[in-house]
Every structure is written in structure tokens, then in C-alpha cells.
Image: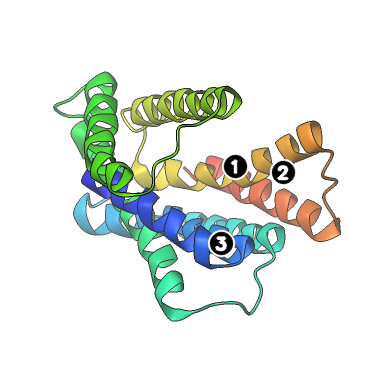
Amino acid sequence: GVLGFSGLALYFFAIERLPLGNAVLLNQVSPFFTIILALLFLQEKVSAKQWLATAIAITGVVLVSKPTAGYTLLPALAGLLSAIFSGASHVVIRELRKTDSPDMIVFYYTGMTSLVSLPFMLGSRFQAPTLPQLGSMLAAGVAATISQWLLSCAYRYSKAGDLSLYLYANTVFATLLGLIFWHEIPDFLSLAGIILVLAGACINTYSS
């Protein structure tokens, strides 16, 4: 719970202070740290093809996010730490499969996040959301909870290093949802990046 909250809070901090593409790119290296940490702490072996697949997927994320030169030290460090904490939380979830159910893992994650966030909310200039805003936030919360539960289930059946690369698929889905709901047509670089992410996932699948 602490690792997950820290990763999320630092990601929001980076998004607020960096160009969006830069913040997304820094956070999206979390699967790389998952592989490294799983190798160090869980002794999960990583094949050469998996390293290649990860490199290809990261290249794809770079093409989609299109980072600029707008980096400043503290926000950039926060973005990188968000990836490290996120990767570490996935390794812990993988280890917790031995003792806890996905329901219990999600309960503690959401409970810890809510408790730690509460003082920040009360200490700031809180404004009650409108009904449309409240509906949007509730929908995001439901989607995130389902996502976390499915992630916890997935780590029960496969190694952290094997699964982590598929998290890059959120770049693909974000682009597709932008096209469907906001008619954001991806350019050539974004399409090339999506192809590379999918290629990395395919290589990872057949190398496992």
C-alpha cells in the first residue's frame, strides 16, 4: 500500500510540473524496474529475448509520448521514483500471492491510499466536486480498483518479469480511447510506437 501510494503521488507531482509526455515516459519505465527488482529479490530469471522485448516496448512508449527538453531536476526525479515505487509494489504483490488473496491485497492498497490521502485533502483548499465531476472520479476509482484486482490475480500465475511488459499496453489503449472518445487521431510516430509496444509484447510472450 505504501509503495503503491508513493508511486501514484509522485506520478501526479511529475504530471503537474512536467510536460505530459515527459511525465508519462518516466513513469512508463516501471516494468523495467519490476524486472530488475524481481531478478534481485525473487531470483526470477530474465532471458535475453525479454530484455530485447522490453527495449523495443520502451522505444515504442518514447514514440507515443514524444518527450521534449522540458525536464527539471526535482519533478523528473519524482517521475523516475514513481516508476521505481510502482515496480517495487508489483514485486511485493507477486510475493504476497503466497499468503494473501487478491481481494486482501486490493483492500489494503485502497485502504492505505485513502488514509494517507485524507490529511492532504483536509489540509488543502477543498472544493466539493460537481455531480459530473463526482461521477467521473467514481468511475475512475472503480476502473482502477478492477485493474488492481486483475493485476493481483495475474501475478499469482506468472512471474513478475513476464507480466510487467504487458503494462505497456496501457499506452496503446490510451491512444485508442483518445481516438474513440475525443477523436484524437494518432500521428505516424504514435502508430509506429504502438506497433513497437505490441511487437515487444509478442516477443515477450513467445520467449516465456
The residues bearing labels 1 and 2 have C-alpha atoms spaced at a distance of 10 Å
Q: Residues within 10 Å of mark 2 (few under 14, many from 20)?
A: some
**Is label 1 in contact with label 2 (beta carbons under 8 Å)?**
no
User: Which residue in the protein does label 2 denote?
Assistant: 175
Q: Amino acid at mark 1?
A: Ala
Q: Nearer the viewer, residue 155 or 90?
A: 90
Q: Secondary structure at mark 3?
A: helix
Task: Write down the quadrant of residue 174 in the picture.
Answer: top right
Q: Please give the name of the residue rendered at 50% of the width and 31% of the height, measured from the top-left corner.
A: 129
The spot of residue 177 in percent (x, y) is: 72, 35
Task: State the SS at label 2.
Answer: helix
Distance CA(mark 2)–CA(mark 3)? 14 Å
The mark that comes first in sequence, 2 or 3, is: 3
Q: Residue 117, which numbered label?
A: none
The three-letter amino acid code for the residue at tag 3 is: Leu
Query: x%, y% of residue 54?
Result: 53, 57
Residue 94: image quadrant is top left
The mark found on residue 169 in the picture is 1
Examine the rendering and report whether any part of residue 45 can be seen: no
Query: Crowdedness of circle 1 by 10 Å Cα count: few (<14), some, many (20+)?
Result: some
Which numbered mark, 1 or 2, is in the foreground of this view? 2
Rendered view: 154 above or below 49: above
Residue type, numbered disc 2: Thr
- Crowding around mark 3 (Cα neighbors within 10 Å: few <14, some 14 to 19, many 20+) is many
Q: Is residue 34 visible to the viewer in this orientation of the structure? A: yes
Q: Is residue 39 above or below residue 153?
A: below
